[in-house]
Image (cartoon, grey):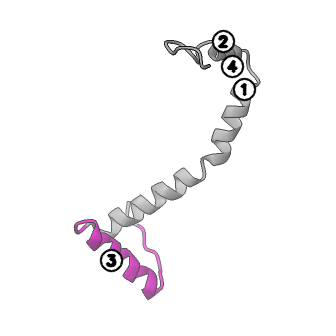
Amino acid sequence: MKLSVSLPDQDIGFIDAYACEQGGASRSAVIREAVSLLRASQLGPDYAHAWDEWADSDDRDAWESTLADGLPPTP
């Protein structure tokens, strides 16, 4: 899918410089990477919620018993 966006010259210069540093990547490749990183940065609250949900579940106790599997007890 094609998309047209308007960006300041400074942003276009940054995209072009980054593309060049990445071995001649296209502007589209740079924008895809930026969107991917932005998407990943938004996952923090989802991971925190999943962790809290797991910590409150019965599975937590079962997994706690495996923490030292194969390791000698600490002094």
In the rendered image, the quadrant that contains the N terminus is bottom left
For the residues labelled 3 and 4, the Cα–Cα distance comes to: 48 Å
Instruction: Tell me which residue sits at (40%, 78%) in the image.
Output: 14
- Residue 49 on the magenta span: no
Tell me the crowding category of disc 4: few under 14, some 14 to 19, or many 20 or more residues within 10 angstroms, Cα based.
Answer: few
Amino acid identity at mark 3: Asp
Q: Are marks 3 and 4 in contact (CB under 8 Å)?
A: no
Amino acid identity at mark 2: Ala
Residue 53, given in percent of the width and then of the height, sits at: 72, 29
Q: Which residue is mark 1?
A: 55
Q: Are marks 1 and 3 in contact (CB under 8 Å)?
A: no
Amino acid identity at mark 1: Ala
Instruction: Tell me which residue sits at (65%, 42%) in the image.
Output: 46
Q: In terms of sequence position, does the residue under pointer 4 or pointer 1 come before the other?
A: 1
Q: In terms of sequence position, does the residue under pointer 2 or pointer 1 come before the other?
A: 1
Instruction: Tell me which residue sits at (47%, 80%) in the image.
Output: 6
For the residues labelled 2 and 4, the Cα–Cα distance comes to: 5 Å
Secondary structure of residue under mark 1: helix
